[in-house]
């Protein structure tokens, strides 16, 4: 038997599942770049360029520290 990983994709916008998915992201302490881009409505490349002081590298995965990045966004008017 071949076991396949089931990957839960992002629900379609403006649905109740999407709202629940976003609330779940807001509770996480670490976000992937894709999750952070979706939560903050910022492009992934922009996040990769901005997040060097707000990042933990887990292997080759870049994880954004949500609390510190929230403070950064609150202080700065433009990105």
Image (cartoon, grey):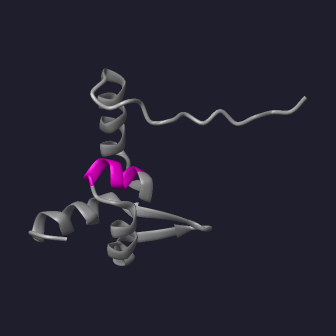
Residue found at x 35% / y 54%? 36
Which of the 4 quarters of the picture holds residue 43? bottom left
Residue projecting furthest to the right: 1
**Magenta span of residues:** 35-41
**Image location (x, y in percent) of residue 31:** 41, 54
Residue 66: image quadrant is: bottom left
Question: Is residue 72 shown above or below 19?
Answer: below
Foreground pick, 52 / 68 = 52
Quarter of the figure with residue 11: top left
Q: Is residue 69 above or below residue 40?
A: below
Picture quarter with the N terminus: top right
Instruction: Please name the predominant secondary structure of the magenta segment in the image.
Output: helix
Q: Residue at x 26, y 53 (%)?
A: 40
Q: From the viewer's perspective, tell me whether residue 78 is left or right of residue 58.
A: left
Q: Residue at x 40, y 50 (%)?
A: 35
Where residue 25 appears, x then y in whole percent? 36, 43
Percent position of residue 5, x then y? 70, 36
């Amino acid at each position: 038997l071949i076991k396949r990983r089931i990957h839960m994709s992002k629900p379609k916008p403006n649905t109740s599942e999407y709202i629940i998915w976003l609330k779940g992201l807001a509770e996480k302490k670490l976000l992937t770049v894709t999750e952070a881009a979706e939560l903050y409505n910022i492009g992934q490349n922009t996040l990769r360029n901005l997040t060097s002081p707000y990042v933990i590298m887990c292997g080759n995965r870049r994880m954004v520290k949500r609390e510190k990045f929230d403070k950064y966004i609150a202080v700065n008017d433009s990105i």
